């Protein structure tokens, strides 16, 4: 005959500890190799991206060199400027790799915008020049051969430009259908030329060429912007990835907030999969960022997910730390109650173990009196990750069956705990007899699962 | 309770004499300790001063109890030694290895033994066991499990008692507090009931009550209401001979007192004044109902003050302490007289020696220990108390009693006024007297009580004498005949008091020696004259002693009074001796002054008319006495007198004179006269008469018992009345109190002769019949004249003649009823009435009032004269006769 009594332990202690554990939320960023690792990985990504850009630009220059005299100058200038722009961005990103800050990002953006404007202004100038040249057309109206020659040149340049765009630029991503439209215009100009209407053909081909040239420039710059965005997203996500790896183990903070030597917080273990999940999520985002098919908008979005992931990491670490502390608290409570029962009731602690020997679960402590009576303490969290601790006192008394005596003993235990300074509720009787199985502490060890990540 | 608990190493034998270990091996479930010594300290064989708990611990350990557990209100379970504690719990009370670590090292969390929360980290409540001194080693106080709550305390103790593994004693050193305030009284009561059922002598539950007697313990337990079983146990123990489950802890015995003295000597530097005095000092101290704690305080104070322990110091504590260094035997031998008493104790001593020798020779089945109870029969002051005190010591020296102190009890200390209290009183007194002598003075008072609770007292006393055999000697003392009655009062008494020792009154020379001894011990030295007078006084006191005579006590009183007067006279000149003037006046009556001249003694008779034969008789008596005194001999016993004569012849008047005269002659000490008649001496129911006569005799002792119309006592003899019994009793009393009582029997001559015939003893005792003849007419007229003159009247001319004629006529008309002087007094009253009537008729005479006189003082009173007409007509006779 026995009794089950439930004692609620005050939560204020929990909150005090939680305030302490919140320090864990500040994830550790100044990991010793974090910046290097991030930079190394980011650089590779940058080099790869900008290598592609340079390669393309180099091919462009070859195309430009094959252009007629009249367009070569314009395109050469533009190509030079584009290369310069890309190189500068490359250099800047390279320099700041792994630690690019928001304001420098804005500066860089403003600078790029200025370069864009400069290029636009230069090209406007060139076009004005071209327009002056077009005045020759009237002259050429009289000289049909020369006129035909001019048209054929423009058509050739245009075909070269269209071919360049067609071959090397993701025009369908940025200006879908535009190249087709311009190509059709060129066909129109060719028909006009074949019909000898050179003046009409010249107007169309000149206009189309410029449109193609603009299209090239636009795509080039957009592509540069995307490269940049990709670099930023990759860097941010690589950093998160590194942070996750770097926070898999954390120091244990003591009551004073300082780390306790000799103890680590195994976040992977205590987060019970949450950290791994976070890592996988980050990996997925990174893969997405590295995918050249990912557009700029998504790349921006991917980059912007990084702070959220970092926050989630902090929370996971905090939760893990808190769970570890809570686990210790359960043992502390067992110690305190065992002490009280030792002092007040002459029970001795004989055995104790976590549920299935898993420190993340409830804690059981068995006490035995000289006369053979036993008490099993069952200490658990009322709700996972919340402050309320519940101590269930399961008494197994052989000497007395009188309810009055058992109640007196339960009350004495409560009084003893209160006298020891534990803010506990009046013991509440729970229905039913205590489970005799609870007295078998050994079975928990038998059911122990190997701890993941530990040998 | 975590007192200084370095338990003394268990030594062999009893640690302290007054701590009876028998109760711890009585085989009872409980051992109840009580008595005045339970909160005392104890001095053990190693001269260590121990508390009850320590002493008890050691006794229990010596009795083979391996685990000794204590329980009090504040500490429901505690130990005084590490061994007991270690036997009780698998693990020692856990202690914190370091700050902010858990106390149970086997408890490990993810952070090891770290204490992360504030839970249980408190330094106060949780750290009791962490006292470094306590952890120092096995010699330190055993860490207690303070705070064990009452329900678990009971559970724990009950478990220990039930356990079979190791012999366990559970001790409640403060049983009253626990029973009164226990928070789990229900469980405690159950545990007791359970234990009394299960107990088999293996384990023991010891309860210590701060109550003087078992009765008080039972009363207390009953008063708590919740522990009926314990109450039953205590009451059963009270009825059980030897009371195996209980022990009374009394006051320290001599051996312990001596150890205490030595302990104080060694530790506090107490000086011993004279080593030869130590034994009697120890004896006096052990005889006092004082605790060792009290003695220790006094001894330490004495040591601090640099004083020496000597007889003076002891007298400062115990007034009148007898520090006679001689052993009890010598002091008993030195007592005057008491030969029979001394012989008895000599025989007892021989008996004990023989028994001891037999034991040594291997006769294990030696005789039972001798009966210790005694009756001392004797008058007050015959040394009964002194001997009783010595008896205690003698018994102790013979090894028959443990302590040998004497508790003196009066009947009123033993008998209560209400039902049920008497037994408690007896118990309480007996408890005090255990291991010593209970001296009940005037013990017959127990049997004397007609409707009190004396019978209950005797019954209780007998049962205690039986139950505490070997630990109690009762000495019942009182007057010899009363003690006989006492022994008869209950058939159990005679067998339990096999020895009656007679303490006879001290003879005069012994009394005088006692008197002079006390006087000289106090300082003054009597002059030969004073000594001579004191000798005569003592002789007189002895001769006139009655049942209340205090023997030595009277001598002490006299010595002290003489001392007081002597001191008042000599002041600082203490070399001056005691002189006769220092003897108090009250005692001088015994000095029997020389018989005065009978003329002077009898001058008073001259005022009366007639009485010639009386006068002659008394003169002769006085002269005989003078003759004897002149010859230097003793006086003689005052004679009983028989006054024969008709009424009104002055017998009562003379009886009063005789009392005064015999006192003046030194024949009676007081000389008062008690007048009685048949009504005062004869009862109407059977058994009433003798006490009436005895009472009258007692009242008249040292004076005169005057029985008027004594013949009326004998008158109903033939009708079965009790007059004969009165006469028989009176005869016996007269013989018994010869010299202290004068009986004067008076009556008509003829009837008095019948009276003397009624009892053969009477005639021989009334050796001096004195006739009171009727008055002659002339005498009667003379009486009338004197009587009238005494009232301020004179007899006018012719009045005497007419009165003589009236008286003659009256006597002639009724000679037997004539009242002589009484008739004359009646006649005078009639004459006064007639005179008054005369004045009422003719006007009142002018008195010497202030308005009629000169105002210079009252005028000489002129006697009023009777006229012959005031005398009734002689021819008519009259109703005045008789």
Image: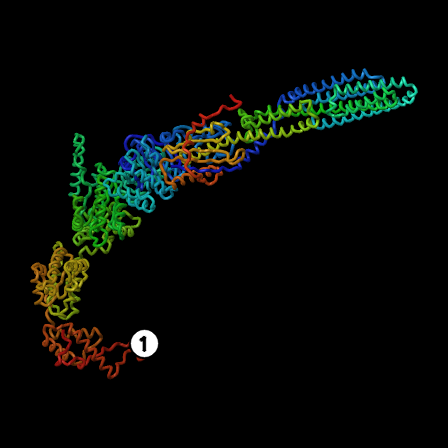
Task: Choose top left, top right, bottom left or bottom right for residue B281.
Answer: top left
Vertical arrangement, residue A430 with respect to residue B860, above or below:
above
Q: How crowded is mark 1: few (under 14 residues within 10 Å), some or many (20 or more)?
A: few
Task: Choose top left, top right, bottom left or bottom right for residue A83.
Answer: top right
Q: Can residue B297 be seen in this view?
A: yes
Q: Where is residue B615 in the image (x, y as percent from the top left)?
A: 12, 66
| Quadrant in the picture for the C terminus of chain B | bottom left
Q: Where is residue A91 in the image (x, y as percent from the top left)?
A: 73, 20
Nearest the viewer among B401 and B167 is B167
Q: Where is residue A390 in the image (x, y as percent from the top left)?
A: 48, 36
Q: Position of residue B595 (x, y in %)?
A: 15, 59
Give SS at disc 1: loop
Toward the bottom, the furthest residue is B842
- Chain letter of mark 1 equals B
Q: Is residue A227 left or right of residue A401?
A: right
Nearest the viewer among B536 and B462 is B462
Nearest the viewer among B688 and B87 is B87
Residue identified by numbered label 1: B856
Q: Which colour scheme is used?
A: rainbow
| Quadrant in the picture for the N terminus of chain B | top left
Vertical arrangement, residue B280 with respect to residue A306, above or below:
below
Q: Is residue B769 visible?
A: no
Vertical arrangement, residue B227 with respect to residue B628, above or below:
above
Nearest the viewer among A269 and B110 is A269
Q: Which residue is drawn at 67% across and 24% down?
A: A289
Q: How many marks?
A: 1
Q: Is residue A382 left or right of residue B774?
A: right
Task: Choose top left, top right, bottom left or bottom right for residue B725.
Answer: bottom left
Q: Is residue B739 left or right of residue A109?
A: left
């Amino acid at each position: 005959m026995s009794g089950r009594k439930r004692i609620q332990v005050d939560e204020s202690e929990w909150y005090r500890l939680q305030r302490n554990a919140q320090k864990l939320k500040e994830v550790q960023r100044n990991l010793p190799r974090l910046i290097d690792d991030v930079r190394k990985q980011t650089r590779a990504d940058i080099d790869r991206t900008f290598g592609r850009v340079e390669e393309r630009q180099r091919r462009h220059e070859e195309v430009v060199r094959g252009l007629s005299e009249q367009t070569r100058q314009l395109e050469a200038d533009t190509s030079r400027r584009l290369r310069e722009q890309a190189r500068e961005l490359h250099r800047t990103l390279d320099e700041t790799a792994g630690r690019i800050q928001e304001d420098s990002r804005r500066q860089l953006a403003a600078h790029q915008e200025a370069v864009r404007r400069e290029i636009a202004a230069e090209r406007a100038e060139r076009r004005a020049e071209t327009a002056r040249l077009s005045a020759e057309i009237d002259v050429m109206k009289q000289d049909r051969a020369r006129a035909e020659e001019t048209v054929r040149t423009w058509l050739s340049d245009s075909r070269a430009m269209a071919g360049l765009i067609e071959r090397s630029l993701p025009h369908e991503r940025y200006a879908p259908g535009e190249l087709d439209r311009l190509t059709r215009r060129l066909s129109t100009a060719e028909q006009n030329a074949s019909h000898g209407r050179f003046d009409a053909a010249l107007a169309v081909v000149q206009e189309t060429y410029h449109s193609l040239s603009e299209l090239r420039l636009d795509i080039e710059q957009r592509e540069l912007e995307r490269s940049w965005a990709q670099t930023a997203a990759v860097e941010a996500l690589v950093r998160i990835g590194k942070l996750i790896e770097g926070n898999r183990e954390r120091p244990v903070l003591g009551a004073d907030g300082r780390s306790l030597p000799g103890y680590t917080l195994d976040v992977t273990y205590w987060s019970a999969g949450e950290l791994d999940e976070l890592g996988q999520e980050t990996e997925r985002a990174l893969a997405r960022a590295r995918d050249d098919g990912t557009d700029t908008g998504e790349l921006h979005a991917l980059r912007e997910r990084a702070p959220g992931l970092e926050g989630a990491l902090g929370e996971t670490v905090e939760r893990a730390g808190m769970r570890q502390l809570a686990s210790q608290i359960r043992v502390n409570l067992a110690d305190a109650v065992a002490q009280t029962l030792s002092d007040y009731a002459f029970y001795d602690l004989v055995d104790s173990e976590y549920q299935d020997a898993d420190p993340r679960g409830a804690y059981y402590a068995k006490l035995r009196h000289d006369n053979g009576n036993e008490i099993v303490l069952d200490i658990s969290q009322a709700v996972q990750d919340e402050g309320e601790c519940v101590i269930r006192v399961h008494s197994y008394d052989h000497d007395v069956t009188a309810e009055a005596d058992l109640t007196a003993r339960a009350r004495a235990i409560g009084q003893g705990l209160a006298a020891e300074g534990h803010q506990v509720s009046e013991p509440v009787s729970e229905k039913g007899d205590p489970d005799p199985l609870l007295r078998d502490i050994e079975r928990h060890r038998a059911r122990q699962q190997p701890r993941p990540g530990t040998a | 309770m975590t007192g200084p608990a370095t338990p003394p190493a268990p030594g062999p034998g009893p640690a302290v004499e007054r701590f009876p270990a028998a109760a711890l091996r009585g085989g009872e479930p409980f051992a109840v300790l009580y008595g005045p010594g339970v909160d005392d300290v104890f001095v053990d064989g190693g001269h260590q001063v121990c508390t009850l708990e320590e002493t008890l611990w050691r006794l229990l350990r010596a009795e083979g109890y391996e685990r000794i557990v204590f329980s009090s209100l504040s500490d429901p379970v505690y130990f005084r030694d590490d061994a007991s504690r270690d036997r009780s719990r698998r693990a020692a009370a856990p202690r914190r290895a370091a700050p902010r670590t858990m106390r149970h090292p086997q408890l490990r969390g993810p952070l090891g033994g770290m204490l992360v929360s504030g839970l249980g980290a408190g330094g106060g409540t949780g750290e009791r066991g962490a006292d470094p001194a306590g952890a120092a080693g096995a010699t330190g106080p055993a860490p207690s499990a303070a705070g064990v709550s009452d329900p678990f305390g009971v559970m724990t103790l009950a478990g220990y008692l039930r356990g079979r593994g190791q012999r366990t004693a559970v001790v409640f050193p403060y049983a009253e507090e626990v029973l009164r305030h226990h928070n789990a009284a229900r469980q405690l009561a159950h545990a007791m009931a359970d234990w009394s059922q299960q107990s088999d002598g293996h384990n023991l539950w010891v309860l210590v009550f701060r109550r003087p007697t078992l009765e008080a313990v039972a009363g207390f337990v009953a008063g708590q209401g919740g522990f009926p079983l314990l109450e039953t146990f205590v009451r059963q123990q009270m009825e059980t001979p030897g009371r195996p489950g209980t022990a009374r802890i009394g006051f320290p015995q001599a051996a312990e007192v001596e150890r205490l003295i030595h302990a104080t000597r060694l530790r506090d530097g107490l000086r011993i004044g004279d080593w030869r005095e130590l034994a009697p000092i120890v004896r006096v101290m052990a005889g006092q109902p004082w605790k060792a704690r009290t003695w220790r305080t006094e001894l330490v104070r004495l040591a601090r003050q640099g004083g020496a322990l000597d007889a003076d110091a002891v007298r400062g504590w115990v007034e009148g302490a007898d520090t006679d260094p001689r052993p009890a035997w010598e002091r008993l031998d030195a007592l005057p007289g008491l030969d029979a008493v001394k012989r008895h104790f000599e025989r007892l001593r021989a008996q004990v020696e023989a028994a001891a020798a037999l034991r040594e020779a291997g006769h294990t089945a030696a005789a039972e220990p001798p009966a210790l109870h005694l009756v001392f029969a004797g008058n007050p002051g015959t040394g009964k108390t002194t001997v009783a005190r010595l008896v205690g010591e003698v018994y102790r020296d013979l090894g028959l009693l443990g302590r040998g102190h004497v508790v003196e009890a009066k009947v009123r200390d033993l008998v209560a006024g209400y039902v049920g209290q008497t037994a408690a009183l007896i118990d309480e007194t007996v408890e005090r007297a255990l291991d010593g002598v209970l001296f009940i003075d005037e013990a017959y008072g127990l049997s004397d009580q007609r409707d009190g609770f004396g019978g209950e007292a005797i019954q209780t006393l007998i049962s205690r004498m039986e139950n505490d055999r070997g630990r109690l000697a009762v000495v019942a003392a009182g007057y010899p005949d009363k003690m006989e009655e006492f022994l008869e009062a209950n058939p159990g008494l005679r067998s339990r008091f096999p020895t009656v020792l007679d303490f006879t009154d001290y003879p005069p020379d012994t009394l005088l020696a006692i008197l002079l001894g006390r006087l000289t011990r106090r300082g003054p030295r009597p002059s030969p004259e004073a000594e001579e007078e004191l000798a005569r006084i003592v002789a007189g006191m002895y001769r006139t002693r009655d049942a209340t005579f205090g023997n030595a006590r009277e001598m002490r009183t006299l010595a002290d009074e003489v001392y007081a007067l002597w001191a008042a006279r000599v002041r600082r000149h203490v070399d001056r001796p005691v002189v006769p003037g220092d003897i108090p006046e009250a005692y001088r009556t015994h000095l029997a002054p020389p018989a005065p001249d009978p003329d002077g003694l009898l001058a008073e008779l001259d005022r009366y008319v007639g009485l010639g034969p009386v006068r002659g008789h008394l003169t002769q008596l006085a002269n005989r006495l003078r003759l004897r005194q002149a010859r230097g001999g003793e006086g003689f016993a005052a004679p009983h007198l028989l006054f024969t004569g008709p009424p009104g012849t002055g017998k009562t008047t003379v009886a009063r004179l005789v009392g005064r005269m015999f006192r003046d002659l030194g024949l009676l000490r007081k000389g008062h006269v008690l007048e009685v008649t048949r009504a005062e001496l004869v009862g109407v129911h059977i058994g009433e008469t003798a006490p009436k006569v005895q009472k009258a005799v007692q009242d008249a002792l040292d004076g005169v018992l005057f029985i008027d119309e004594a013949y009326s006592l004998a008158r109903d003899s033939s009708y079965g009345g009790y007059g004969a019994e009165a006469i028989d009793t009176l005869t016996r009393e007269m013989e018994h109190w010869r010299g202290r009582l004068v009986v004067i029997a008076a009556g008509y001559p003829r009837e008095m002769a019948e009276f003397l015939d009624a009892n053969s003893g009477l005639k021989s005792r009334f050796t001096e019949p004195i006739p009171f003849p009727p008055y002659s007419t002339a005498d009667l007229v003379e009486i009338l004249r004197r009587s009238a003159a005494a009232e301020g009247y004179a007899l006018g001319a012719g009045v005497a003649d007419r009165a003589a004629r009236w008286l003659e006529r009256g006597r002639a008309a009724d000679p037997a009823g004539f009242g002589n002087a009484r008739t004359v007094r009646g006649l005078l009253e009639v004459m006064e009435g007639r005179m008054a009537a005369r004045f009422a008729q003719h006007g009142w005479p002018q008195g010497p009032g202030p308005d009629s006189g000169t105002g210079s003082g009252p005028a000489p009173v002129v006697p009023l004269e009777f006229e012959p007409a005031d005398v009734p007509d002689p021819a008519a006779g009259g109703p005045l006769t008789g």
